[in-house]
Image (cartoon, rainbow, N blue to C red):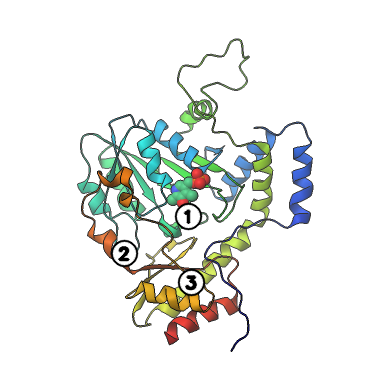
Amino acid sequence: MSKEISTIPLVKVAMPPREVLLPALEAVLYSGMISEGEYVYRFEDRFAEMFKLNNVLATSSGTAALHLAMLLSGVEAGHEVITTSMTAEPTNTTILQMGAIPVFADVDPLTGNLSPVAVEAAITNRTRAICVVHYAGYPARLNELREIADRHDLALIEDCAHALGAEYNGQPIGSIGDYAIYSFQAIKHMTTVDGGLLMMKDPSQMAEARKLRWFGLAKGVPRTEVDITRVGYKYNMHNVAAVIGLKQLDGISPLLQRHYENGRYFDGVFEGVSGLSPAPVQPGVKPAYWLYTLLADDADEVERLLAARGVMASKLHRPNHLHSVFKSFAGPMPGLDEFYKRLIHIPCGWWVSDEDRARIVDTLKRG
Ligand SMILES: *Cc1c(COP(=O)(O)O)cnc(C)c1O
């Protein structure tokens, strides 16, 4: 039993094969057109077509896309944005960057996703938006959240950074919110090294969004005539990132499919193992399983058992309200406390083979 076993990482960078990527990359790098250009627009079109979205703009990061979504939704300094603490930090640093107030609503103790009841209870007359994260790639309760947002005239922003390829009642993830953002940072399902994308429901906002992406300048208007009427940012994607994105899209379907198959496999085998329960999946919902969410009576013990067999498993994120900058905005969140205590993410992505899955399951069934 002393045979060396390979480590199974929890997250992994996906890159297209060299012979596919490098010639395309070389062509762009020496084309003389490396900034925002045709490759970016082609990437936007192909992404929108593949993931059945309208009105998309590629950006320099997911965080940039989120900032644009908040600007377009009319959030201003002093407004409140209802959000989740169970996420990666950019979801909430962006709210502070706006000068707005993050209002942390509690989450479902079984999924880590926002509880619609808690969201509704957190609404005040200063609330402008609800920011929902599909945590680890498991879609949040979008029907209820959409209905609450409509009833209170609030913008619904979907942070889909973990959820590429997920579906909700047959609808593609990101198509229910007024805005949705995606991230192409290194370890997401697909990467452009850094990059992101913004979807907006209202096509009449596209011109404003394009300007906000580029200092406030309208493209195509001569530099001597163009007028900045609202400060924008340098949030564009460039052609070099976009060509990587285009090559990623060529290979993305089998990769997303493998995340899904591994996730469904774990859902089946962990059901009924004592001390463990898989995060429940609502009927009609297809998770993206960026990470697999397992709940354990003793999460630390599960982490130790898996580590001993070369499997990297962990709680990947720190609840954001534990950071000093967010502490003063947080109240009691018993749902989050319970979720975080029992949470252990296990590897589930395209790199997890049938043998890897067997090693993980065998370790936990014996433990
Ligand atoms: C990765 C991530 C982001 C931000 O993406 P970047 O592309 O790194 O700026 C936003 N929200 C969540 C939940 C993320 O995991």
Q: Mark 1 or mark 3, which is nearer to you?
A: 1
Q: CA distance from mark 3 to mark 2?
A: 21 Å
Q: Please, which residue is most extreme toward the bottom here?
A: 1
Residue at position x 57%, y 52% from top? 186
Residue at position x 63%, y 85% from top? 3
Q: Please, which residue is most extreme toward the top here?
A: 224
Q: Mark 3 or mark 2, which is nearer to you?
A: 2
The residue tagged 1 is: 162
Give the residue type at disc 2.
Phe
Residue 182 appears in the picture as rendered: no
Q: Mark 1 or mark 2, which is nearer to you?
A: 2
- Mark 1 near ligand 1 (CB under 8 Å)? yes
Tell me: residue 348, above or below residue 53.
below
* Image mark for residue 264: 3
Does dot 3 land on a helix, a strand or a loop? helix
Where residue 62 appears, as percent x and y from the top left, is 50, 43
Residue at position x 31%, y 64% from top? 339
Where residue 192 appears, as percent x and y from the top left, is 62, 47
The residue tagged 2 is: 339
| N-term-proximal mark, 3 vs 2 | 3
Give the residue type at disc 1.
His
| N-term-proximal mark, 1 vs 2 | 1
Give the residue type at disc 3.
Arg
Does dot 2 land on a helix, a strand or a loop? helix
CB atoms at circles 3 and 2 under 8 Å apart? no
Dividing the picture into quadrants, the one containing residue 217 is top right
| N-term-proximal mark, 1 vs 3 | 1
Query: How many neighbours does mark 2 have within 10 angstroms: few (below 14), some (14-19), or many (20 or more)?
Result: many
